[in-house]
Image (cartoon, coloured by chain):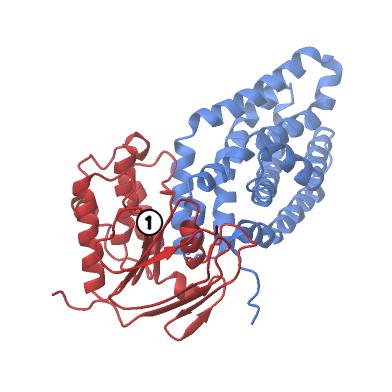
Chain colours: A blue, B red
Amino acid sequence: MRWFLTLLHYECLLVLRSAKDIALMLGFGLIALSLMAITADPAWLSAAAPGMIWTVVLFSVLLMIERIFQHDRDSGRLDLLLSQPVPAWIIVLAKALGFWFQAGLPLILAAPMASLLMQLPLQILPDLLISLILGTPTLCLLATIGAALTLGARQPTLLVMVLVMPLLIPVLIFGALALERSLIGYSVLGDYLWLGVSLCLALACIPLGAVAINRNTTLPPDPN
Amino acid sequence: MPERFFAETHLDVVTENPRGSPVRFALSSGERLCVRGNNGSGKTTLLSALAGQPSNPNHPPMLRRYNTRSIVGQDSEFQAAIHWLGHRPGLGQALSIAEEWRFWYAMLATHTPNAPCPLAKIAGHVELDRPLDQAVETLSVGEKQKVALARLFLAPRAIWLLDEPDSHLDTASRNTLAGWMATHCAEGGLIVDCSHCTPSGGTTLWLDAKE
């Protein structure tokens, strides 16, 4: 627990100092949405908005992937951490949570702005926020695990996209479905539950990431 | 003569060396082994494998015996007894000196530290004359090395594995470093280090590159 908190504190410091990256991501997301809003037929806009918002969220998160492990790996910090008796899954979990602070939380805070841009009615804003709060942790967690799996690859972002995109599609579908149902006044509880299930499944993938960051540090079995 | 701080510690290592003849050594408390060799003779590989991190998965297995335990791969008891200073300083991104030290002070402690990190004491110890809220990135390479070396004093560990600890340091700091190593050995710790300079003490192990 102390290890986790220390690592998380470090991640938070990094987030506070990466305002430029976060601004870039939010700028990308909001510009993409406003371009869609400008070019789309107004009659068609609010029907297409849920899918558009979730697609932009997905791409914004994927934009940030390279930052998750890159510096720690290149500077030798990750090796140093792994040379300590800290379980690797704690490192992955702290990284994922830190990545959510960096990528997920700003997107949630920017959601009201996005819903204004897409001319969504104000009463579906709570549903938008709840679905983002449930969905973005899954995106961030899977992106972190993807980044761990591709550690050391030259251009990890594209590889991670190919690797984790199929896993992220359900989140996209349930998130967009929740908004669509909310728009026509149906209950969205079922979609929330599915988003929660996705999060649980993503949590279960953490050991995969832990093995991945440890991969280069595991010795072959003792021949004797 | 300082009192022996660390319990009696033994370390036996046997490993293949892909670049030369097999390596075998045994160290006990108070001893220092200086690994020397030409560039590419496998010094860094040997030290990182010793720390439980072979730089490539095909590296031949290293048999280590720590006190009475045989260790293959990573072992939490052994990992908690070593300080490994790799050839990269491993400093955090955008952190200040104080934040960097507080992080490792909390990470390296074997139990929850009940005192705050003694920053001023550490800074005096490593002779770093900078404001502690200065960003590590703005320091010179030698000063970064000092910030990294300060980890040795953030938690007492019996085994120091130092990969060219004197790189980028000025002559005065090299002498200070030699003093730390002598003190550490006198306190009952043991050191495996590699360097291109003539070591100030301990035995020397030459890694010969294959013809």
Question: Which quarter of the figure has residue B56?
Answer: bottom right
- The residue at 45%/37% (across/down) is A16
The residue drawn where x is 41% and y is 64% is B206
Please name whichever residue, A23 or A179, is drawn nearer the observer in this view of the structure: A23
The quadrant of the image that shows the C terminus of chain B is bottom right
Which residue sits furthest left?
B1
Label 1 marks a residue whose chain is B
Please state which amino acid type lies under the numbered disc 1. Trp
Q: Is residue A83 visible?
A: no
Would residue A54 be visible to someone looking at this image?
Answer: yes
Instruction: Looking at the picture, tell me which residue is in the foreground, A61 or B13.
Output: B13
Q: Secondary structure at mark 1?
A: helix
Label 1 CA crowd tier, 10 Å (few <14, some 14–19, many 20+): many
Side (left or right) of A16 relative to B171: right
To which quarter of the image does residue A128 belong? top right
Give the farthest residue toward the bottom: B68
Q: Nearer the viewer, residue B194 or B173?
A: B194
Q: Which residue is mark 1?
A: B104
Q: Vertically, is B108 above or below A17? A: below
- Residue A219 percent coordinates (x, y): 61, 68
Q: Going by the image, does A223 lie left or right of A20? A: right
Measuring from the top left, give residue B186's x and y in whole percent. 21, 73
Q: Quadrant of the N terminus of chain B?
A: bottom left
Residue nearest the observer in this picture, A124 or B33:
B33
Q: Position of residue B67 (x, y in %)?
A: 42, 83
Q: Position of residue B109 (x, y in %)?
A: 37, 66
Position of residue A157 relative to residue B205, above or below, is above
